Image (cartoon, rainbow, N blue to C red):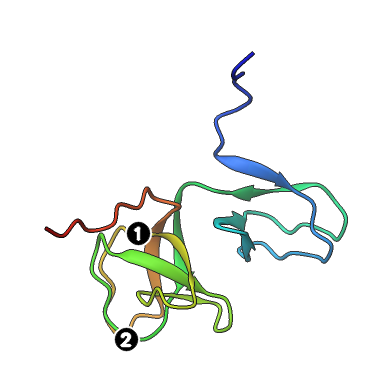
């Protein structure tokens, strides 16, 4: 057997060592998930790995379509890749004064090609 279908992959099982609150962003190496519901410590729950989410953002304007990165220290998204992990792409623009931005979680990332 080379491969066998398991499920759609819209969410993944997750058993945290500490309680996780609904809406909390969880980083698993290079994969980012968001808890839809509270998950108690050592209890099986699930993380969304696809979908559009409203997420806290750093200050600054964000244009629709730009890559976004999770800043674990400040618990928000930013357009700065350095030291942060890719989380998805903005699906709507957000003004500098906006506290949140809508993002497509784990959107396919294609690096710009330069000649």
Residue at horizontal 64 percent and vertical 13 percent from the top: 1
Tell me the SS state at disc 2.
Answer: loop
Quadrant of res 22? bottom right
Residue at horizontal 30 percent and vertical 52 percent from the top: 110
Quadrant of res 104? bottom left
Q: Which is in the foreground here, disc 2 or disc 1?
A: 1
> Residue 97 bears which disc, if any?
2
Q: Along the horizontal axis of the image, is 68 left or right of 111?
A: right
**How many discs mark residues in the rendered view?**
2
Mark closest to the chain's N terminus, 2 or 1: 1
Residue at horizontal 88 percent and vertical 55 percent from the top: 42
Q: Outermost residue, left direction?
A: 115
Q: Position of residue 6 (x, y in %)?
A: 63, 25
Residues 111 and 68: in front is 111
Q: Along the horizontal axis of the image, is 104 left or right of 18?
A: left
Distance between the Cα atoms at labels 2 and 1?
A: 19 Å
Q: Looking at the rendering, in which quadrant would you find the C terminus?
A: bottom left
Quadrant of res 59? bottom left
Q: Outermost residue, front direction?
A: 115
Q: Is the residue 104 above or below the residue 73 in the image?
A: above
Q: Which residue is mark 1?
A: 89
How packed is label 1: few (under 14 Cα within 10 Å), some, or many (20 or more)?
A: many
Q: Position of residue 63 (x, y in %)?
A: 23, 69
CB atoms at circles 2 and 1 under 8 Å apart? no
Residue at horizontal 43 percent and vertical 69 percent from the top: 69
Q: Position of residue 102 (x, y in %)?
A: 38, 63
Q: Position of residue 60 (x, y in %)?
A: 30, 84
Tell me the SS state at disc 1.
Answer: strand
Q: Is the residue 4 above or below the residue 11 in the image?
A: above
């Amino acid at each position: 057997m080379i491969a066998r279908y398991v499920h759609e992959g819209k969410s993944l099982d997750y058993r945290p060592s500490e309680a996780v609150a609904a809406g909390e962003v969880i980083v698993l190496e290079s994969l980012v998930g968001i808890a839809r519901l509270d998950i108690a410590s050592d209890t099986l729950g699930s993380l969304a790995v696809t979908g559009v989410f409203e997420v806290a953002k750093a200050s600054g304007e964000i244009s629709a379509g730009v890559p976004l990165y999770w800043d674990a220290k400040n618990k928000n998204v930013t357009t700065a890749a350095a030291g942060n992990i890719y989380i998805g792409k903005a699906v709507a623009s957000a003004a500098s004064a906006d506290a949140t931005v809508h993002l497509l979680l784990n959107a396919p990332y294609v690096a710009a090609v330069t000649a």
